[in-house]
Amino acid sequence: MRLATDVTTGTAFQAGDEATHQFAGMLIISLFPALFWTALLAAGGAAVGHAPSAMTLMTVGTAIAAFLAAVTHALFATS
């Protein structure tokens, strides 16, 4: 059984390492859903015969990614 006062061996994370991991997590959390919903919008538009323009898809994808990145940043800032 380990106590809270036991010293662990190994490499500790530096502050920069944690920021890098948080940034990578934010990219994963924001980009994959944005790509999914943008692809779904493009496929749905093509299925009904009114495919959205590339500018519309880019704007929607950017808005989704920015919103999710802001929410993720707010959650990381509180923890």
Image: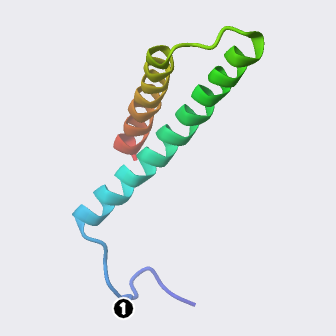
| Amino acid at pointer 1 | Thr
In this rendering, the answer to whether 66 lies above or below 77 is above
Q: Nearer the viewer, residue 3 or 28?
A: 28
* 72 to the left or right of 41: left
Q: Nearer the viewer, residue 74 or 37?
A: 37
- Quadrant of the rendered structure where residue 58 is? top left
* 45 to the left or right of 56: right
Q: How many marks?
A: 1
Residue 76 at what x, y percent from top left? 39, 44
* 11 to the left or right of 67: left
- Quadrant of the rendered structure where residue 41 is? top right
Q: Residue at x 44, y 79 (%)?
A: 4
In this rendering, the answer to whether 58 lies above or below 48 is below
Q: Quadrant of the N terminus?
A: bottom right
Element under disc 1? loop
The residue that disc 1 covers is: 9
Q: Residue at x 48, y 14 (%)?
A: 56
Q: Residues within 10 Å of mark 1 (few under 14, many from 20)?
A: few
* 41 to the left or right of 2: right
Q: Nearer the viewer, residue 66 or 75?
A: 66
Residue 54 at what x, y percent from top left? 48, 19
Colour mapping: rainbow
Q: Residue at x 42, y 45 (%)?
A: 26
Q: Residue at x 51, y 20 (%)?
A: 57
Residue 46 at what x, y percent from top left? 70, 17
Residue 2 at what x, y percent from top left? 52, 88
Q: Residue furthest front?
A: 49
In this rendering, the answer to whether 10 lies above or below 49 is below
